[in-house]
Image (spheres, rainbow, N blue to C red):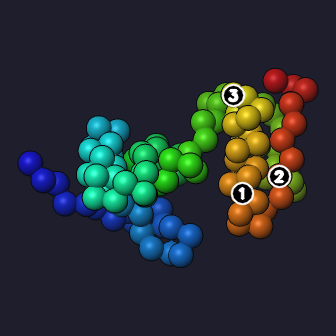
Amino acid sequence: MFIPPRKSVTCVSKNGNPLTEFDSIDEAQASADYENGRNPACDLAPYKCQKCGKFHLKPSEFIVEKLQTVCSCTRFGGIGRKDAYPTRAAAEKMAKIRAKSGVSLTPYQCRRF
């Protein structure tokens, strides 16, 4: 049964368009498989959004696993927690992704973890 895509009311892309949202990982994976079959170069993969709790799609090259547990370190200015990654390689991948949008990050091993 075809389920038409739903657009999010809370999550938007970098250019301000609402993201397509899915209720389950299976629904999101089925959509990714469909889109990847139509255009193998896109290589979409599902991820669970920390903002809305739903699933969205993005190119797999931009998916980096984060740890669910976080240390008490805060972001610059003391607002919000820093993200933690399971490996240095994952942290470096995220730094490269963020560098493409002009954000400079330096991965380091947290002393509190």
Q: Tell me which amino acid carries mark 1.
A: Arg
Q: Is residue 65 above or below residue 34?
A: above
Q: Mark 1 and mark 2: span between their CA atoms?
A: 7 Å
Give the mark nearer the N terminus: 1 vs 2: 1
Q: Give the quadrant of residue 6.
A: bottom left
Residue in the foreground of this view, choosing between 37 and 69: 37
Q: Secondary structure at mark 2?
A: loop
Query: Of label 3 and label 1, which has the lower sequence position?
Result: 3
Amino acid type of the residue that numbered disc 3 sits on in the rendered structure: Pro
Q: Amino acid at mark 2?
A: Leu
- Are the residues tagged 1 and 2 within 8 Å (C-beta)? yes
In contact (CB < 8 Å): disc 3 and disc 1: no
Reading the image, the residue beneath label 3 is 86
Residue found 61% across the figure and 41% down from its top: 64
Viewer-nearest residue: 93 or 26:
93
Q: As drawn, is 43 to the left or to the right of 67?
A: left
Residue 38 x/y as whole percent: 28, 58
Q: Whole-Å distance between the Cαs marked 3 and 2?
A: 17 Å
Q: Position of residue 61 (x, y in %)?
A: 56, 49
Q: Position of residue 7 (x, y in %)?
A: 33, 65
Q: How many marks?
A: 3
Assign a secondary structure to mark 3.
loop
Q: Judge left or right: residue 31 versus residue 4.
A: right
Residue sitting farthest toward the top: 113
Instruction: Using the numbered discs, state the Cα–Cα distance from disc 3 to disc 1 in whole angstroms.
Output: 18 Å
Q: Position of residue 41 (x, y in %)?
A: 42, 57
